[in-house]
Amino acid sequence: MNDGLEQTQRKQPFTWPVRIYYEDTDSAGIVYYANYLCYFERARTEWLRALGFEQTDIAAQHGVVFVVRSITVEYLAPARFNDALEISVELGDVGASQIKLTQRVTRGTDKLVEAQVRLACVNIAAMKPVRIPTIIKAKISEITT
């Protein structure tokens, strides 16, 4: 397992390891397509954690959460039971209330899945877009400069 904090401060993209279990596969023995969305979510959570932000703390302290506004996924090759994969998070554009990311699933040097993800920062009570908290935006900016 990698040290996410050190890696995030060092470079992009951030990566998180995933092992494929039998429960992740379909009747053909390959990873069920929707499971990749779960892997992407886990990697984004770990990316934020590596930056020093727990999602529960963001919600409690700032009254906001990050939600997926849109995602486009390209499935390029299958993963199978017991594969060791890397799920990456690469920061794209950061706006006032949105973050664009590229996420990939790789097995060694093979790219299996690629997604373009747009996150929106929303107020929990109103479920309306709001500005990304300054402290979070500043920390994210540090890894891109």
Image: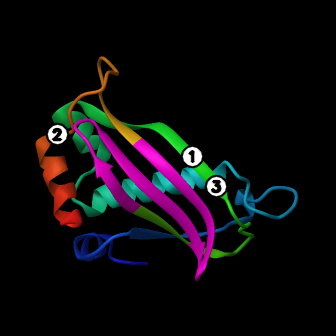
On the image, the x and y values in percent for residue 34 come to: 67, 48
On the image, the x and y values in percent for residue 113 come to: 62, 62
- The residue wearing badge 2 is 133
The kind of residue on which mark 3 rests is Glu
Of residue 66 and residue 99, the one placed in the foreground of this image is: 99
Disc 1 packing (10 Å; few <14; some 14–19; many ≥20): few
The kind of residue on which mark 1 rests is Thr
| Circles 3, 1 touching at the beta carbon (< 8 Å) | yes
Of callouts 3 and 2, which one flags the residue occurring earlier in the amino acid sequence? 3
> Where on the picture, by quarter, is residue 108?
bottom right
> Above or below — where is 55 with respect to 36?
above
Q: Residue at x 58, y 82 (%)?
A: 109
Q: Is residue 24 left or right of residue 95?
A: right
Q: Which residues are magenta?
A: 90-118
Of callouts 1 and 2, which one flags the residue occurring earlier in the amino acid sequence? 1
Q: Quadrant of the N terminus?
A: bottom left
Q: Residue furthest bottom?
A: 108
Q: Secondary structure at mark 2?
A: loop
The kind of residue on which mark 2 rests is Pro
| Mark 3 and mark 2: Cα distance apart in space | 31 Å
Disc 3 packing (10 Å; few <14; some 14–19; many ≥20): few
- The residue wearing badge 1 is 72
Q: Residue at x 66, y 68 (%)?
A: 20
**Number of the front mark, 1 or 2:** 1
Of residue 19 and residue 47, the one placed in the foreground of this image is: 47
Q: Secondary structure at mark 3?
A: strand
Q: Quadrant of the C terminus?
A: bottom left
| Mark 1 and mark 2: Cα distance apart in space | 26 Å
Disc 2 packing (10 Å; few <14; some 14–19; many ≥20): some
On the image, the x and y values in percent for residue 51 come to: 24, 60
- The residue wearing badge 3 is 74
| Mark 3 and mark 1: Cα distance apart in space | 7 Å
